[in-house]
Image: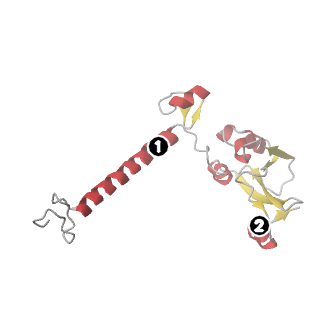
């Protein structure tokens, strides 16, 4: 600062002699620290317990004894099936209006996809996906049917993340793999 009380621009200090860059860095580091802490807290609460017995338990799921962690919640179909040592195939179905739907086929570890088994098709309801049939772990209906010797097919409707959407060119179709018409 010069004798007239003005800020000396070359020093980077304000009229009280405080370094502006240093202050800005401390504030930025503090903001980043708060954001990281918030993310860590939220992640801890959201993944500790993600399945509860009653709706009211979800409001206190991080401390409720009736809530537990289920690794299959928010997992994709392939990771769920592989976690329980089952076999999986992915098939893409092209509709008449060129929409691509994904259908999964599962078999238990002792079965073969080539064996002659009775087929069964499980279709989820509104706002769901095929994972709904496997999210109870080894107690899921899809796994029970595969263990009972059925050829289990799990369908997906339009609009969920398993069905990739509208096909505009044959190139996109070939990248996805074999299609069934």
Q: Which residue sits at x=80%, y=71%?
A: 169
77 lies above or below 45: below
Where in the figure is residue 179, as x and y percent of width and height?
A: 83, 64
Q: Which quarter of the rendering shows the C terminus? A: bottom right
* 19 on left or right of 170: left
Question: Looking at the image, is 168 positioned above or below residue 70?
Answer: below
Label placed on residue 105: none
Whether residue 22 sits left or right of residue 2 in the image: it is right
Q: Furthest residue to the front?
A: 4
**Picture residue at 15% right of the left edge, 60% below the top:** 17
Could you tell which of marks 1 and 2 lies nearer the N-terminus? 1
| Residue nearer the viewer, 7 or 118 | 7
Q: Where on the picture, by quarter, is residue 103?
A: bottom right
Against 116, is 173 above or below?
below
Closer to the camera in the image, 104 or 42: 42
**Residue 94's quadrant in the figure?**
bottom right
**What whole-number distance in Å separates the C-alpha atoms at marks 1 and 2?**
38 Å
Q: Which x, y percent locates residue 90?
A: 75, 58
Seen at 16% across and 57% down, the residue is: 16
Compared to 64, does 106 lie above or below? below
Label drawn at residue 177: 2
Element marked by disc 2 = loop
Q: Nearer the viewer, residue 168 or 46?
A: 168
What's the coloring here?
secondary structure
Count of number-bearing discs: 2
Q: Residue at x 69, y 50 (%)?
A: 86
Mark 1 sits on what residue?
Answer: 42
Residue 47 percent coordinates (x, y) = 51, 42
């Amino acid at each position: 600062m010069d004798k007239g009380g003005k800020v000396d621009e070359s020093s980077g200090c304000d009229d009280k002699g405080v370094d502006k860059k240093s202050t800005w860095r401390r504030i930025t580091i503090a903001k980043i620290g708060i954001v990281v802490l918030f993310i860590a807290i939220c992640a801890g609460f959201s993944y500790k317990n993600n399945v509860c017995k009653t709706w009211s338990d979800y409001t206190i799921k991080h401390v409720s004894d009736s809530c537990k962690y289920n690794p299959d919640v928010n997992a994709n179909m392939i990771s769920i099936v592989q976690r329980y040592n089952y076999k999986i195939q992915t098939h893409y179905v092209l509709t008449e209006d060129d929409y691509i739907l994904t259908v999964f086929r599962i078999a238990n570890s002792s079965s073969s996809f080539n064996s002659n088994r009775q087929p069964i098709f499980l279709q989820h309801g509104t706002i769901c996906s095929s994972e709904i049939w496997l999210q109870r772990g080894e107690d899921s209906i899809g796994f029970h049917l595969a263990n009972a010797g059925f050829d289990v097919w799990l369908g997906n409707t339009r609009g969920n993340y398993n069905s990739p959407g509208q096909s505009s060119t044959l190139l996109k179709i070939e990248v996805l793999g074999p299609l069934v018409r």
